[in-house]
Amino acid sequence: MENFIVSARKYRPQQFDTVVGQSHITDTLEHAIGENQLAQALLFCGPRGVGKTTCARILARKINEKDGSVSEDGFAYNIYELDAASNNSVDDIRELIDQVRFAPQVGKYKVYIIDEVHMLSSAAFNAFLKTLEEPPAHAIFILATTEKHKIIPTILSRCQIYDFKRITIEDIQGHLRNIAQKENIQYEDDALYLIAQKADGALRDALSIFDRLSTFSQKNITLAKAAEVLNILDYDQYLNIVDLAKENKIPETLFAFNEIVKKGFDPHIFIAGLGNHFRDLMMAQNARTIELIEVGERTKVKFVEQSQKWNAQQLIDAVEICNHADINYKNSKNPRLTVEIALMQLSSLTANLGDTKKKSS
């Protein structure tokens, strides 16, 4: 049986041009290598799962390839990685400093990648200062961290700092689409969009969710299955609730809410999500603001269609009702009733045409 390799490892970029969503970093590094203006101490900082370690490894290989050196193992012996989360003592840093003295046998540079560098102890930082300030000509240090504010200023001042950004939903979705096509996985674009949205800018998290969904769905990733695995409310459920409210069907609206609660969803999360749904409907009414809706293209079409059934004032009132319920939820002795009252108010907004009912303050 062939061992399964997770997508985050299988599709880890090997070149700068395949790194997702960090072109401002990769272009700068490539230019620095090409023009021989690369600093000997670099600090890569940013959220988790956005490519810091990946870029460090690519850079470590590229700088040795630049001078025409060849290595069958990709200069693996020139690259030293230290996980500062578990090797954060003075002795660990002194051991690294001892290694720095020796020049590489192949290639021009030795590259030292220190991950989670903010975890180093104060004594370890201080022991590292002199070497970082005046490193040997053959040594390059790449420090990576998710918490730049925890690094002492004397270290920051000695490094060239590169700030990695969260990867956009569209970039993550596009990357997942490419992997799905290579792996012959059937998918719905809106499902990939939902995965990207849930990942919150971290590509590694998105790939982990993608692998889990691929296994669960037997290589047929749909929006419904994605919502089920991620334990989030499907957009269709909000669309259904809003349609029922528009038709003033109070009993049906309350029954639909009850079904959602029976599935284990928190009523507080539901009412907050419903408020966001009405906000998205407001955005969908205008061609200029429709791009502010963070949903897939197919779902966006549904939002536009539903938004046409409401006038602007009704949507404003609906957002206020949901926001009011959201604020009062935790202080209520009967929080479920708070949500149900909000749903009844929403279902009454269009009861009389031309006479929009506002919630009582």
Image (cartoon, grey):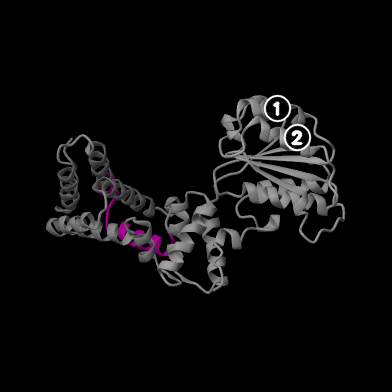
Quadrant of residue 335 within the rendered picture:
top left
Q: Is mark 1 on a helix, strand or loop?
A: helix
Q: Which residue lies furthest to the left in this view?
A: 251
- State which quarter of the image contains the C terminus: top left
**Residue that carries the numbered disc 1 in the rendered image:** 127
Query: Could you tell me residue 232's position as x and y percent?
Result: 34, 55
Q: Which amino acid lies under the numbered mark 1 shown in the image of this protein?
A: Ala
Q: Which residue is drawn at 40% across and 53% down?
A: 286
Q: Residue at x 22, y 36 (%)?
A: 328
35 sits left or right of 278 in the view:
right
**Residue that carries the numbered disc 2 in the rendered image:** 97
Query: Could you tell me residue 30's position as x and y percent?
Result: 75, 49
307 sits left or right of 361 in the view:
right
Above or below — where is 317 with respect to 154? below
Magenta-drawn segment: 296-316
Query: Could you tell me residue 246's position as x and y percent?
Result: 21, 57
Task: Rate crowding at label 2 as few (under 14), some (14 to 19) or many (20 or more) other CA atoms within 10 Å.
Answer: some
Above or below — where is 345 with respect to 88? below
Of residue 130 and residue 272, the one placed in the foreground of this image is 130
User: Within the magenta stretch, is there residue 48?
Assistant: no
Q: Which amino acid lies under the numbered mark 2 shown in the image of this protein?
A: Ile
User: Within the magenta stretch, is there residue 303?
Assistant: yes
Of residue 157 and residue 307, the one placed in the foreground of this image is 157
Q: Are marks 1 and 2 in contact (CB under 8 Å)?
A: yes
Query: Could you tell me residue 354's position as x and y percent?
Result: 19, 51
Of residue 60 and residue 346, the one placed in the foreground of this image is 60
* Disc 1 to disc 2, C-alpha distance: 9 Å
124 sits left or right of 78 in the view:
left
Q: Residue at x 60, y 52 (%)?
A: 21
Q: Which of marks 1 and 2 is nearer the N terminus?
A: 2
Q: Is mark 2 on a helix, strand or loop?
A: helix
Task: Rate crowding at label 1 as few (under 14), some (14 to 19) or many (20 or more) other CA atoms within 10 Å.
Answer: some
